Amino acid sequence: MRKSWLSFLLFLCAPLLFALNMVVARWLNGSVPPVTLAFGRWLVAALLLLPVVWPLLRRGLLRGAAPGVLAALAVLGGVISVAPQYGAATYTSAGNIALIAALSPLFVAVIERLVWGVPLRPAMLGGIGIAFSGILVAVFRGDLGALLRLDFNPGDALMLFAILAWAGYTALLRHRPVALPPMLLLWVVAAGGALCLMPGVLLEWGYRGIPHLDGRALSGVVFLGLVAGVGAYGLFARAVATFGAARASMSMYLVPAYALALGALLLGESLHPYHLVAMTLVLGGVAFGTLRPTAS
């Protein structure tokens, strides 16, 4: 009985940490520039993970991995899917960020179709249409006039770009699996992401000036490195081991609900009826497109 409750708690906590990543990025609200924030997150994560993976590195486990695939995973999962997300947090709400992130399973299916020729089921096409209609409701705030004028928040466009990169990372990992322990792979993404982001940090500092990192900013960076960079991934990997990949992925559908609630409670973000409509359409579309009927 206790084990089942712990498993249920694990299922609930993994998406909570992913939602906290979005809420804390929104809480920082541009006090740390997005590329610097992404770099700081991965630097903290890489340093925290180093004692854990050091014995694996000494055994030379990286030698057998394909360097091109590892580099692509670091760029997609550590750079392109993170820095634009933190840029989006300057402009749009944590709820909108999470709603767009919920499209990830559908984008993975589209990328698999375009790159690897994986067939798209009719249900998947229907789910994509339903979920995108929900994103339109969120992005244009339920205002048909705003839709007709294409009056959207630039943060939503940045988040859409970031989640496309994350979907590419997920699809690549699925079709070009890397034979590394999960924590070592995460360290590669973290260290590789920080390394790739360094030139962007220098450009950002040259354009915007070196940011003043006060206590709030530093605590936010450390929190993101610990919670988003290590904790969320670790809990999700444990959920996959406990429930299987398909059922564990279903827990991610809770992220928008958590983000909307936490954004309202902690950041004072307003909740509107269109948020409920958007979340219903997005999660309904994702569920419709990704759930396979069981044979009778």
Image: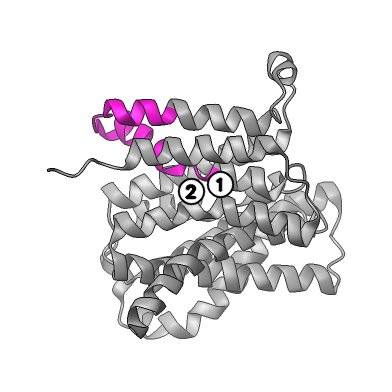
The image quadrant of residue 153 is: top right
> Circle 2 is placed at which residue position?
76
Q: Residue 212 has which mark?
A: none
Frontmost residue, 61 versus 268:
268
Frontmost residue, 11 versus 221:
11
Question: Over which residues does the magenta segment extend?
Answer: 101-128
Q: Residue at x 39, y 53 (%)?
A: 250
Secondary structure of the residue carrying numbered label 2: helix
In the rendered view of the protein, which quadrant contains the N terminus? bottom left
> Circle 1 is placed at which residue position?
80
Query: Mark 1: which amino acid?
Result: Ile
Instruction: Check contact, mark 2 vs mark 1: CB within 8 A.
Output: yes
Q: Residue at x 86, y 71 (%)?
A: 214
Side of 117 where 18 appears, left or right: right
| Residue 93 versus residue 32 in the image, above or below | above
In the rendered image, residue 104 lying in the magenta stretch gets the answer yes
